[in-house]
Amino acid sequence: MNSIIIGQYIPGKGFLYRLDPRTKMISIIFLMVSVFLLQNVYQLFIAFGIGILVLLFGRISLLKVIKGLKPIFLLLIFTFIFQIALNKSGDVVSDTTMHINLYSIGAVVLAFVIWRILVRFNKLKMLLFLVFVVGIYFIFRYITYSPDFYSFQFTIYEKGLEMSAFVVVRLLIIITLTTILTLTTKPTDLTQGMESLLHPLKKIGFNSEEFALIISISLRYIPTIFDEAQKIMLAQASRGADFSEGKLKDKLKQIVSLLVPMFIIAFIRSEELADAMESRNFVPGQKRTRINILTFSIVDVYTFVFTLLCFAGAIVAKVVL
Amino acid sequence: MGIRFKEVSHEYPSYSKTMYKAIQNISLDIEAKDEFIALVGHTGSGKSTLAKHMNALIFPTSGTVEIFGNEITKKRNKKIKYNNIRQKVGLVFQFPEYQLFEETVEKDIMFGPLNFKVSHEEAKKMALSALNMVGLDKSYLERNPFNLSGGEKKRVSVAGILAIDPEILVLDEPTSGLDPAGKHIMMDLFREIHEKTGKTVIIITHDMDLVYQYFNRVIVLKDGELTFDGSPDALFRSDILESNHLDLPNTIKTLKFLKDEYKLDIDIYKKTVEEAAMEINEVMSDE
Ligand SMILES: Nc1ncnc2c1ncn2[C@@H]1O[C@H](COP(=O)(O)OP(=O)(O)O)[C@@H](O)[C@H]1O
Ligand SMILES: [Mg+2]
């Protein structure tokens, strides 16, 4: 297990880094709403183009953003396939017969093996998966040299294609927006921004400072907890509890042997932290000053203007078109 | 041969781009029987990392560790039963909190033996004898491990490994955080286990007094590299202590002070306080 870095903040330059976290959060909320207001796939492509321009303008490497998309790539591919296969309205775009026969099944198995082997040596796992899926489509379509066990019509409809692109592009934009936020904002800045934004809620009894404190302590402790979990696993492996071997019943026992020390240590750590905070004169609810005070600059103003323009554009698109 | 390190290095992934080398190019032989070894070095010198290689908890990033004939390399080998290695080499971690989890001491000590497919009755017997070995009586069997004192927890965690009956016993700082009397009780215990059973025992410690008094071999690490492997006598007579961030034992320090300050003709290499006192007495009566 490698160390896990929470939040994908990567230090860098560019205007997105200089923006106040509050600006970023508010803008992203508005931009997301705008994206949901959009009606069809062409508008979404325009939004996507604007998004790419913003990334380029902010001098953020597209590669990093794509990396951030990795966890949901599988979801994107499946959404795409399901939409294409199941949505049956509009004109027919392509209508092909899929052949399932001895040769095509053999070819699929071969493709599967090749895919699994390539995955071992290659970093572009998701791309390979995509190639594999597309490959299966072509195998079933064109390999016809032996009698079919079974064949069926695979029809792609215009609406299906459109909807799948629509859903996928929308997801892409939303994820990219949140990735921009986590990529360019330190977790501490994020919580500070959140605290400041939630401050008005104090009137209804919601203490934003404590909330922000809880969030930042939690973030701070995630890597620590992972470290501790790893140490406990090693300590129990020393006593023969290798988590990769054993029957289900043994596994349950092994999980207990991991969880109990985990909780005990979490309690110990939190008590230590509380003592440390108190001995440095921390009093809950007291007014505190900040080392870094959040301030808006001219860049924030431009960003707000840009966001409002996008939002207005989306509303116009919704109402007029 | 028990454990043989062949040019072993271990790198941890670190937050910066470069990997962090915790141990480098270590070659070392440890016999399966009759060794009593101290492993010393400054904090962060890689002692714990080295210890974790001894029962294949972590694998070298280069080089090989041979443990009772099993070659441990960078890659996990499907033919090797890693669990068996852990039965042969028992490793006790520095903090007992990392391993205690059952509601009674007895059950906790039985966890190891049961994992190694010992029958329930047999494990019970082993738990009691391991508990006795660490100097706790059977009234502790039913106690909750979390309500014990720090020293008692430590003993229970040692008993948890002893019950597995390993051939080689590795202990990571077993005396840290104990009072001076507690330290000696624990050390006497390990020495007794070693003498009675002939098992090889490897102990990580920072206490030079203990190193000088108890051990016949000491291994020194500095910044992940092996800088000394020999007898404690040779170590404390050498001039590498300071460069390795090590201290002299208190007896030598005191006698050395007397020798330098009062120009006494005195043998400064005495292991225990009693021996040192006798030496001082003799020299004073000669004067
Ligand atoms: N799990 C880990 N991940 C990253 N670095 C580690 C890890 N464990 C230890 N280190 C680093 O390796 C070095 C050696 O650590 P360790 O073997 O624990 O030393 P010692 O036990 O002598 O104090 C230290 O600098 C430590 O920060
Ligand atoms: Mg250590």
Image (spheres, grey):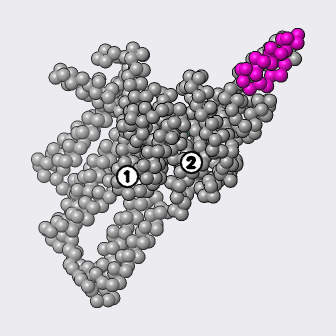
Q: Amino acid at mark 2?
A: Pro
Whether the residue carrying mark 2 lies under 8 Å from ligand 2 is answered with no
Name the residue tied to disc 2: B166
The residue drawn where x is 45% and y is 47% is B123
Q: What stretch of residues is rendered in magenta?
A: B266-287
CB contact under 8 Å: marks 2 and 1? no
Position in image of residue A190 (x %, y %): 34, 32
Q: Quadrant of residue B190?
A: top right
Q: Amino acid at mark 1?
A: Lys
Q: Chain under label 1? A: A
Mark 1: secondary structure: helix
The residue drawn where x is 22% and y is 53% is A43
Name the residue tied to disc 1: A251
- Would you call the spot at circle 1 few (<14 residues within 10 Å), some (14-19), or many (20 or more)? some
Question: Can the viewer see residue B180?
Answer: yes
Mark 2: secondary structure: loop
Mark 2 to mark 1 CA distance (whole Å)? 23 Å
Q: Quadrant of residue A195?
A: top left
Instruction: Look at the picture and state if A241 lies above or below A101.
Output: above
Position in image of residue A318 (x %, y %): 14, 48
The residue drawn where x is 21% and y is 68% is A85
Q: Quadrant of the C terminus of chain B?
A: top right
